[in-house]
């Protein structure tokens, strides 16, 4: 019996047999086909991409709403002009189509993996490998079939591709254990949407000899036990049964269906932070009243951002997934030159100096394409637009001048759009909080407090820096004063204010924010029910003295 620690990305407790998906199982290494002349290779590539996109479309049609966007993402990658131009260059130089696709796909994936300053884009390396490998398998006449299992298993792998999970029939996956991985990966999103207990980052040692053996996967505790002894197995079975009884007992009054009201009768609102349609659906099912923050950065593909029409389709898919509940979309929050096709150049514009609205104002054509797409999508359901990293009213005024130009352009084109889509700002910088009332006077219609950046810039402590961890305090007295100032400005200006970020997903932090005057909270979908339970049991007492002293 041996215990391994990992990071839980989807809670739950299961006991079962391990089925290992190794790299050799995927057959992602050797490419043996001899290249023909460049013209023939070009035609083979075109045919393979067409077949791959057909397969991805078929998978999307079979998928739930929460999973479809993942396969659309991969399909659109395979028609990206910049990506394909590089593949074509290799072929023209005499490389076979399969090898050319492998080289370009691997290079793009490696460059994304090296993006330590942007976790979300870094994790998209898996999607690139998944899509390009599909084309390579077609070119090499490799089978692409659903995995066949005769009983439910716990999947183990170095990391899982979205297609790995989707290739297995529903109900046959008890749990997932990977030696690598992240909570933001598409495989993790699918696991959460399907409520599959999942553990990542358990280390390579677990994979060496786990295939076919029995394992306890305790994603509630972030651990797994290989070859559990009889006593351990008996204890785990007892816990599993108790959990099932508790779940059945809660069905009469599910927590997600209870009114959002504190113990002293104060209403509050729970929203979800999402990346796209694939997790919006699961958030709504968990009781979210809407999407408090949709990170539009999801759309970045090899080459450049989506054009206006492609963005319009993406936003309408998000609105459809929300089922009529409101969505707040954050405009791009990175340097405009941080796209997959040129990330290898090492440009630094996505760092602190030129993030968010600062970058958007430097690239007005890209910014206006996004705004036009959003205002057009606004005709399909309730939608708000929030500008990130706004420092002062000059930023706001400059952005709104471009918004006015977008309205004029859409009017001239005769394209339907929602002219009165609400626009707001993310308060991620202390300077913005200190002048919050100025933004209201200039027409800002709502606030979103971003605790991740605001804590970081208030305390000069990055949350990823372990040595400065004690300075990163999302509920400190300094944060209290900035948040209280923002809430007071919103109340005086009669505009709504929401607080979001990783800290909000912590129940104790959420209660403190409630006492600071917040009534709208946005967090990861996985935290909705635990935060709701804590707020239901709390009182929204006024707290004008600030938080208790930090011990």
Image (spheres, grey):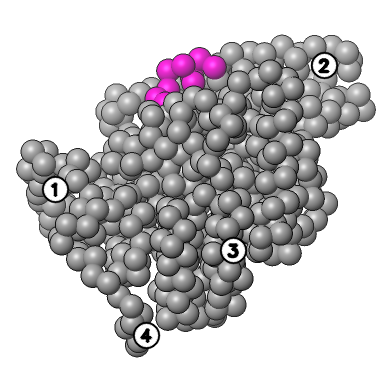
Residue for point 38% across, 29% down: 324
Above or below 462: residue 266: above
Chain part drawn in magenta: 57-67
Residue for point 64% across, 51% down: 333
Badge 3 marks a residue whose secondary structure is helix
Q: Residues within 10 Å of mark 1 (few under 14, many from 20)?
A: some
Compare marks 4 and 1 and give the one earlier in the sequence: 1
- Relative to 242, 473 lies left or right: right
Residue 135, percent from left and from top? 66, 23
Q: Are marks 4 and 1 in contact (CB under 8 Å)?
A: no
In whole angstroms, how far apart are the C-alphas of marks 4 and 1? 36 Å
Q: Are marks 2 and 3 in contact (CB under 8 Å)?
A: no
Question: Is residue 230 something one can see in this rendering?
Answer: no
Compare marks 2 and 3 and give the one earlier in the sequence: 2
Residue carrying label 1: 243
- The quarter of the image holding the N terminus is bottom left
Q: Residues within 10 Å of mark 4 (few under 14, many from 20)?
A: few
In whole angstroms, how far apart are the C-alphas of marks 3 and 4? 32 Å
Residue carrying label 4: 550
Badge 4 marks a residue whose secondary structure is loop
Between residue 414 and residue 218, name the one nearer to us. Answer: 414
Residue 355 inside the magenta-drawn segment: no
Q: Which mark is residue 438?
A: 3
Compare marks 1 and 2 and give the one earlier in the sequence: 2
Majority secondary structure in the magenta region: helix
In whole angstroms, how far apart are the C-alphas of marks 4 and 2? 64 Å
């Amino acid at each position: 019996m041996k215990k391994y620690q990992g990071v839980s990305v989807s809670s739950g407790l299961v006991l079962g047999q391990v089925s290992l998906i190794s790299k050799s199982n995927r057959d992602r290494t050797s490419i043996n086909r001899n290249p023909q002349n460049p013209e023939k290779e070009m035609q083979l590539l075109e045919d393979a991409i067409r077949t791959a996109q057909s397969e991805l479309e078929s998978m999307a049609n079979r998928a739930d709403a929460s999973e479809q966007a993942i396969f659309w993402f991969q399909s659109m990658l395979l028609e990206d002009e910049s990506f394909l131009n590089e593949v074509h260059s290799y072929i023209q130089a005499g490389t076979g189509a399969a090898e050319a696709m492998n080289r370009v796909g691997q290079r793009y994936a490696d460059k994304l993996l090296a993006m330590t300053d942007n976790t979300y884009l870094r994790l998209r390396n898996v999607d690139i490998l998944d899509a390009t490998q599909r084309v390579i398998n077609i070119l090499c006449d490799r089978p692409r079939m659903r995995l066949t299992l005769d009983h439910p298993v716990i999947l183990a792998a170095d990391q899982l591709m979205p297609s790995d999970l989707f290739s297995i029939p529903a109900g046959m996956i008890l749990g997932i254990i990977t030696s690598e991985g992240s909570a933001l990966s598409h495989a993790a999103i699918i696991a959460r949407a399907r409520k599959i207990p999942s553990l990542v980052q358990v280390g390579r040692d677990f994979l060496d000899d786990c295939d076919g053996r029995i394992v306890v996967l305790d994603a509630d505790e972030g651990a797994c036990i290989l070859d559990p002894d009889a006593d351990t197995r008996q204890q785990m079975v007892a816990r599993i049964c108790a959990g099932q009884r508790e779940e059945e007992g809660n069905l009469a009054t599910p927590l997600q269906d209870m009114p959002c009201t504190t113990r002293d009768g104060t209403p509050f609102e729970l929203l979800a932070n999402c990346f796209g349609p694939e997790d919006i659906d699961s958030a709504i099912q968990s009781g979210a009243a809407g999407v408090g923050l949709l990170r539009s950065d999801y759309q970045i593909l090899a080459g450049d951002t989506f054009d206006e029409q492609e963005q319009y389709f993406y936003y309408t898919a998000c609105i459809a997934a929300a089922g009529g509940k409101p969505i707040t979309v954050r405009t791009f929050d990175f340097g405009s030159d941080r796209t997959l096709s040129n990330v290898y150049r090492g440009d630094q514009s996505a760092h602190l100096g030129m993030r968010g609205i600062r970058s958007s104002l430097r690239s007005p054509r890209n910014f206006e394409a996004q705004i036009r797409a959003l205002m057009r999508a606004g005709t399909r359901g309730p939608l708000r637009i929030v500008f990130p990293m706004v420092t002062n009213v000059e930023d706001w005024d400059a952005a709104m001048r471009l918004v006015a130009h977008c309205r004029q352009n859409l009017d001239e084109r005769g394209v339907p759009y929602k002219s009165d889509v609400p626009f707001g700002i993310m308060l991620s910088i202390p300077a913005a909080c200190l002048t919050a009332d100025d933004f209201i006077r200039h027409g800002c219609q709502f606030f979103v407090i971003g605790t991740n950046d605001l804590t970081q810039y208030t305390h000069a402590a990055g949350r990823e820096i372990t040595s400065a961890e004690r300075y990163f305090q999302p509920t400190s007295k300094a944060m209290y004063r900035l948040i209280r100032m923002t809430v007071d400005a919103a109340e005086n200006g009669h505009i709504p204010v929401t607080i979001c970020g990783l800290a909000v997903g912590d129940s104790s932090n959420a209660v403190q924010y409630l006492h600071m005057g917040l009534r709208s909270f946005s967090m990861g979908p996985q935290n909705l029910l635990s935060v709701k339970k804590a707020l239901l049991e709390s009182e929204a007492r006024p707290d004008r003295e600030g938080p208790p002293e930090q011990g």
